[in-house]
Structure formats: C-alpha cells, structure tokens
Image (spheres, grey):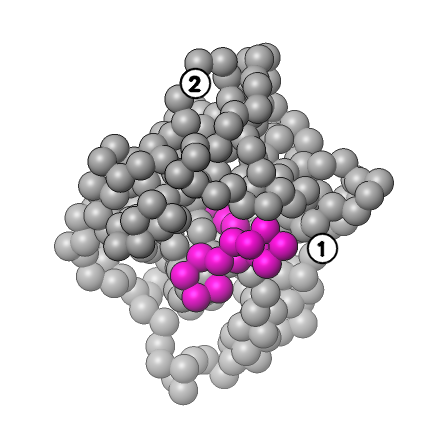
Amino acid sequence: MDVMTDERYSRLAAEHLPGDLVQRWTALLRPCARLRQAKADEQIVAVLGGAPELPAGAAWPEWPGYGPLAFVASVRCAALPGDGLVEEFPRDGTLLFFYFDGQMDEEAFVSVDDPETWAGAQVLYIPESTPVFPADTPSVLEAFPRVELSADTGQSAPDLWLPQARQALLGDTRHWPHPRDTPADLKAFVRAFGKLRTQIDHQIGGHAVPVQGPVEYETANAVLGGVHAWGDQLLDQEAERWVLLAQFGSDSDAKMTWGDEGTLYWLIRSEDLAAHRFDQARLTVQG
C-alpha cells in the first residue's frame, strides 16, 4: 500500500494566517485515512458494496417495520495506516456499515433529527478473532457492485463554523461575522480554505468534509432535541464531543448515489469510539 501523508492544511496556515494564529489552527488538525480505488499491487483496506462477511448465525441488519439495510462498506481496521487514526480508533477487527437506501421503500428515509429512524443506519464491529462467513444479500435487495479501496494518510481540518475553529481564529465569539465583515487578516485564509475543500472523499476518521455545513452541529442538535440556537454554549459543547467515524461519498463505480450526489457521514462520541460502542454511532446524510 502506498502511504502518502499530505500536509495541505498546515501549508494553508503557513501561507495565509498571521503568525500568532498558525499554531492555534494547526493544533486542531487531525490525521485521517482517505480511501481511494486500489491499484492491482496495493493492499485492500476497505471495500464498497459486494457481500459482507458476518459471524455464523448473525442476522442481517434491518430496520424493524421497514426491512433489511443495504450493505455500504467494510473497513479492515488493522490495514488502515496507523498514523492516520486517533488513539481511540480500533486497531484490529472489521467495521461494517449498513444503510436503508430506499430500495424497499422510497418514502422512508433516515434522518438524524428523528430518533425513530436511527435503526435505518447501523455500524457493526466484528472483533479480529471472530470467525466470519460471506453473507447472502437478502433477495429483496440488489447489492452494490464491489469496489476495493486502498488508503492514504492525510490531514483533516475542522469546518470553520465549528466552535473550536471559530475560537482558534476569532477568539471568544459565538458567531462568525458576515463574510464582508471577516477580519482582513483572515480573508485570504477563508477563501483558500473553501477552495481546498471542494472534493469530498471516502474517509475514515479525522474531521468530516461536509457538503452543507458542519455535520457535527447537525448531530449535536439532534441528540439535544433540536431546542438550542446556533452558537448556544450547550450546542457548541455537544458538537465538540462528536467525531467522524467514516464518510462515504457517492461513487459511480459502486453505483452508490446518496441523494443528489451527496455523502453519508457516520459520527460517534469520542468515549463511545474508545469503548467500541458502535451502536451509538449516528448517521447524517448531506447532498
């Protein structure tokens, strides 16, 4: 596997931020594993589509009352680049991602804002020592084509609207100013940051790259009951607790289209990640 470390966000800071902000910004950066289609001689780290391998006797995940979930991806944790993950991430075993994609019912959809739909997106963790066997896709579903993926180590940066980014760049403030009122010494950085985040990859760990605003806020707002205003301290604190587990963009090779060429984001609280409580992961869809 070719492991490549990019430092795009460190370079961005060095080129466009005042000296006193460079360290505050780079302290927020997290490693991640960016997934891409594997070449013939590369180690397979993850797979989109195809058939998952499940322990003997394990039931295929389903959304009660609606039907079985489509299999999205599997990730071999031990094969991921070790320097591309936070300490809490499992170092072995396999993560399996399932999602109710509308094949069974086009009117039913998973929304992070509606707890009654959360069962429509599930993450299973299979420990390394567990015997597994290829599972048959339920006859009512059409499996996505199998696409094998390799990984590169990369840098990831928080969305600028997140509280930690806002505090690092602006100090103690509850909101970013209107674009025309952005401090002069930050304007070039904000423009360059936006241009850098136009491509949304398949990614494991790190900071999410959202399509339509920070997914951490969406998740935090949902679990708090949707009653807190943007910039509320409790909402900020909850948003900082959620980290990206995985994101999977629309992929033509796997015939996966999420909404309008959108992306699936699974987030989890840091303490649940460390304890391998993957049933506590929550899905947000943007696109």
Residue 13 in magenta stretch: no
Query: Could you say whether the residue bearing mark 2 is in a helix, strand or loop?
Result: loop
The residue sitting at the front extreme is 139
Whether residue 280 is visible: no
In this rendering, the label closer to the viewer, 2 or 1: 2
Foreground pick, 229 / 202: 202
Q: Residue at x 44, y 14 (%)?
A: 57
Please tell me which of labels 2 and 1 falls first in the chain. 1
- Total marks shown come to 2
Q: Is residue 186 above or below residue 200?
A: below
Q: Residue at x 32, y 69 (%)?
A: 175
Q: Residue at x 20, y 61 (%)?
A: 229
Magenta residue span: 240-261
Disc assigned to residue 6: 1
**Residue 177: x %, y % from top left:** 35, 77
Foreground pick, 66 / 180: 66
Residue 246 in magenta stretch: yes
**Kind of residue indicated by mark 2:** Ala
Q: Seen in the image, is 211 located left or right of residue 27?
A: left
Whether residue 173 is visible: yes
Query: Could you say whether the residue bearing mark 1 is in a helix, strand or loop?
Result: loop
Disc assigned to residue 58: 2
Q: Residue at x 56, y 17 (%)?
A: 132
**Residue 267: x %, y % from top left:** 41, 43
**What is the quadrant of the C terminus in the image?**
bottom left
Could you give the CA–CA distance between mark 2 and mark 1, rounded to whole angstroms? 39 Å
**Kind of residue indicated by mark 1:** Asp
**Residue 135: x %, y % from top left:** 52, 25
